[in-house]
Image (tube, helix red, strand yellow):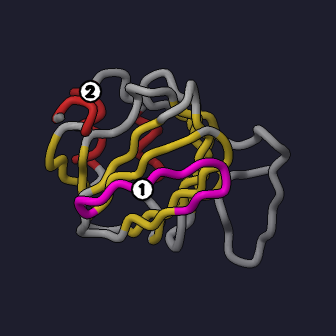
């Protein structure tokens, strides 16, 4: 089945199914992409998180499926384990830190589009910054691991 949401055309994906994309050595799986929303499932390790950045076009929601994550948003830190949920509204600087060996996170963004950034498959911090900028995000600082 397609990972592209089409109006009035339902589809279903089996566990692990979807379009494989990249971010460093992470596993990024595109689950849905439409003008209204994009959905990815990401499996990250410490050190693969994005720098502190701001979205100009979309809001972002993250749901922790497994592992533990510290969310950094609007100058506050929020710790979350499986079942935790956080909102990253557009215009507010944010990032997150993986606190366990890996964490699996479901990411939803509205409107859609930003999820396609992972098709660029950035492998270095410089490539990641270019990818973020190419999709309308502004890098406003280093990841907290590097800025503290």
Q: Where is residue 136 in the image (x, y as percent from the top left)?
A: 25, 56
Q: Is mark 2 on a helix, strand or loop?
A: helix
Q: In the rendered image, which residue does mark 2 sit on?
A: 125
What's the residue at 54%, 55% (across, down)? 107
Circle 1: is it few (<14), some (14-19), or many (20+) Cα within 10 Å?
few
What's the residue at 30%, 55% (across, down)? 94
- Of callouts 2 and 1, the N-terminal one: 1
Task: Please provide the residue range marked out in magenta.
Answer: 74-85
Please indicate whether residue 60 sits to the left or right of residue 134 in the image: right
Q: Do the residues labelled 2 and 1 touch (CB within 8 Å)?
A: no
Q: Is residue 30 visible?
A: no
Q: Where is residue 143 in the image (x, y as percent from the top left)?
A: 25, 37
Q: Residue 78 carries which label?
A: 1
Near-viewer residue (117 or 55) = 55
Residue 104 location, quadrant: top right
Please indicate whether residue 91 sits to the left or right of residue 95 in the image: left
Going by the picture, which residue comes out furthest to the bottom? 8
Q: Is residue 46 visible?
A: yes
Near-viewer residue (99 or 59) = 99
């Amino acid at each position: 089945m397609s990972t592209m949401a089409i109006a009035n055309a339902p589809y279903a994906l089996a566990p692990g199914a979807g379009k494989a994309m990249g971010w460093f050595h992470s596993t990024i799986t595109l689950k849905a992409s439409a003008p209204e929303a994009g959905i990815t499932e990401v499996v990250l390790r410490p050190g693969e998180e994005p720098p502190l950045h701001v979205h100009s076009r979309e809001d972002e929601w993250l749901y922790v499926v497994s592992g533990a994550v510290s969310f950094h948003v609007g100058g506050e830190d929020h710790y979350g384990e499986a079942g935790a949920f956080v909102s990253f509204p557009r215009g507010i600087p944010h990032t997150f830190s993986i606190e366990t060996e890996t964490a699996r996170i479901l990411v939803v963004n509205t409107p859609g589009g930003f999820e396609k950034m992972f098709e660029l498959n950035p492998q270095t911090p410089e490539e990641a910054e270019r990818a973020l900028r190419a999709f309308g995000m502004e890098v406003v600082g280093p990841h907290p691991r590097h800025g503290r």
